[in-house]
Amino acid sequence: MSEAKNFAIIGVGGYIAPRHMKAIRDTGNRLVAAVDPKDSVGILDQFSFDIKFFTEIERFDRHLEKLRRTKPAEQVQYVSICSPNYLHDSHCRLALRVGADAICEKPLVINPWNLDALEEIEAETGRKIHTVLQLRVHPELLKLKARIEQEPANKIHDVILTYITSRGNWYHVSWKGQPDKSGGIATNIGVHFFDLLIWLFGPVQEIKVFHVDQQRMSGWIELEKARVRWFLSADHKDLPASTRQANKTTFRSITIDGQEVEFSEGFTDLHTRVYEKTLAGDGFGITDARPSIQLTYDIRHAEISQSDDRAHPFIKTGKL
């Protein structure tokens, strides 16, 4: 068994941080430092009583640098980044400057040109920036990818992606509701699915955007091996009746040639699987993240097109 690594985490008080902390623990490693501007972080006690906690990023940075210079045995080898999207690239740079690798939550950055700067600092420091593309490690989706790879090269699939994840008014008041900080609906809630589609069906050929408002987006993507009609929403009123009746607040559906892809289970340990791959030297990096970052940027800046036969069923049936 390999020696336990020292981890620090940025953004410990948010929604996704517990999955990272669980992954750190479940891979046999130590969380030794954490930072968050808010101090409602009692969840740390579930993992250790000895984690150094800071509310100021400057003091956190100084602490990690002190460990690097004066206590090599306690130096942090990895910094997990769970901060708001618009701070990810800055926090990746902090991690590399203190001699650690970064493991950054999605999206790695909002704008694709920020990836170029991160590649440069990787080269300068010799450290690596990893990201979390957890749908790529889902067992059912791995099986699906294997099946697609066995098909004739010229086979084109008809895909419908629908993802509705209910958010209340707080969402639009927070940084997540500000496109310049979150990247908007396409980036903040859609980037994992766009990454999945590119991973499964190949590079983007063409895009259309048919609908945009504060809570939802919808459009069409032509990929090398698929034509995709997609719909994303943070509005609970868009949930299908059956989902609401079951008291569920999230609906995710991908159909391929009319057949539903079942992957609703198995989400709880995907971060741990990503960490296992990363620690084994087989994680996801900047090159892996780039296509979906570019796609979501292009979607945000696309002109709105008149809906046509390529539109998602929700658009065509007038559900909106």
Image (cartoon, rainbow, N blue to C red):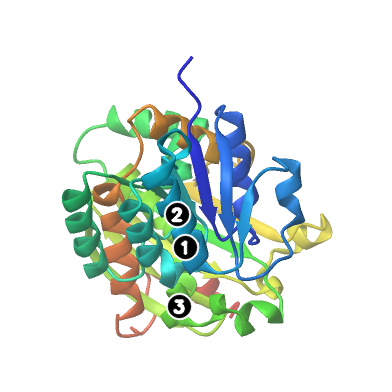
Q: Position of residue 259 (x, y in %)?
A: 51, 43
Q: Quadrant of residue 29?
A: top right
Q: Whole-Å distance between the Cαs marked 3 and 1? A: 15 Å
* Amino acid at pointer 3: Lys
Q: Residue at x 19, y 36 (%)?
A: 153
Q: Residue at x 30, y 85 (%)?
A: 303
Judging depth in this view, the residue of 106 and 38 nearest the camera is: 38
Q: Whole-Å distance between the Cαs marked 1 and 2? A: 6 Å
**Location of the C terminus (image quadrant):** bottom right
Relative height, residue 178 to residue 186 (above, below): below
Residue under numbered circle 3: 181
Q: Is residue 12 visible?
A: yes
Q: Is residue 257 visible?
A: no
Q: Residues within 10 Å of mark 3 (few under 14, many from 20)?
A: some
Mark 2 falls on what kind of element?
A: helix
Identify the disc placed on residue 192.
2
* Amino acid at pointer 1: Gly
Identify the disc placed on residue 190.
1
| Pointer 3 with pointer 1, Cβ within 8 A | no
Q: Position of residue 39 (x, y in %)?
A: 70, 66
Q: Whole-Å distance between the Cαs marked 2 and 3? A: 17 Å
Judging depth in this view, the residue of 74 and 153 nearest the camera is: 74
